[in-house]
Image (cartoon, grey):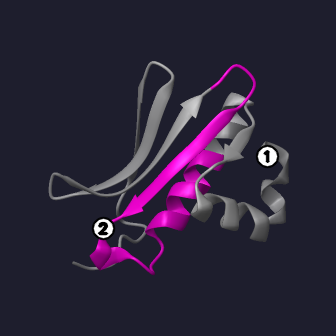
Amino acid sequence: MSEADTEDPILHETLGRRGVFYIERDGRRVAELTYARGDEATIVDHTWVDPQLRGGKAARRLVDAVVQWARAERVKLVPACSYVRLVFDRTPSYADVR
């Protein structure tokens, strides 16, 4: 399996107050980031990437997508997932959604 690069679209689904951004290949999810909307903030609680894609760009692309969504929705994000928290800490331009 090759890297989930820019040719793989990021999809978004919601169900009630829960949501997921994900990358799908050949009908199966190869990466996902989940969140839960609260009254005052949205908690990004989980990121998963297929073992064959780890170390690539897939997880970062999902974080970029949730940040873009948060800006459009005008919501704040709480990075409960350790990977998302690390990306936020290393990306000063994400301060507006934190």
Most distant residue in the left direction = 26
Marks 1/2 in contact by CB < 8 Å: the verdict is no
Locate residue 41 relative to residue 64 in the image: left or right: right
Residue in view at x 36 percent, y 70 percent: 4
Q: CA distance from mark 1 to mark 2?
A: 27 Å
Quadrant of res 36: top right
Residue 1 placed where, x, y %? Answer: 21, 78
Residue 43 numbered tag: none
Q: Position of residue 21 (x, y in %)?
A: 44, 45
Residue located 15% across and 58% down the image: 26
Percent coordinates x, y for residue 74 in the rendering:
75, 30
Residue depicted at 61% across the width and 61% down the height: 82
Which of the 4 image quadrants contains residue 64? bottom right
Q: Is residue 1 above or below residue 13?
A: below
Number of labelled discs?
Answer: 2
Residue ID for mark 2: 50
Q: Residue at x 36, y 66 (%)?
A: 7
Q: Which residue is mark 1?
A: 98
What amino acid is labelled 1 in the image? Answer: Arg
Indicate whether residue 55 is drawn in magenta: yes
Q: Indicate left or right for 56 with 90 as reference.
A: left
Closer to the chain start, of discs 1 and 2, is 2
Residues packed near mark 2 inside 10 Å, few (<14), some (14 to 19) or many (20 plus): some
Q: Secondary structure at mark 1?
A: loop
Q: Residues within 10 Å of mark 1 (few under 14, many from 20)?
A: some
Q: Quick check: 59 above or below 66?
A: below
Per the image, label 2 sits on a secondary structure element best described as loop
Apparent side of residue 61 relative to residue 68 in the rendered image (left or right): left
Q: State the extent of the magenta-drawn residues as a range.
A: 38-67
- Asked whether residue 46 is drawn in magenta, I would say yes
Left or right of 44, for residue 90: right
Q: Looking at the picture, which amino acid does disc 2 mark?
A: Asp
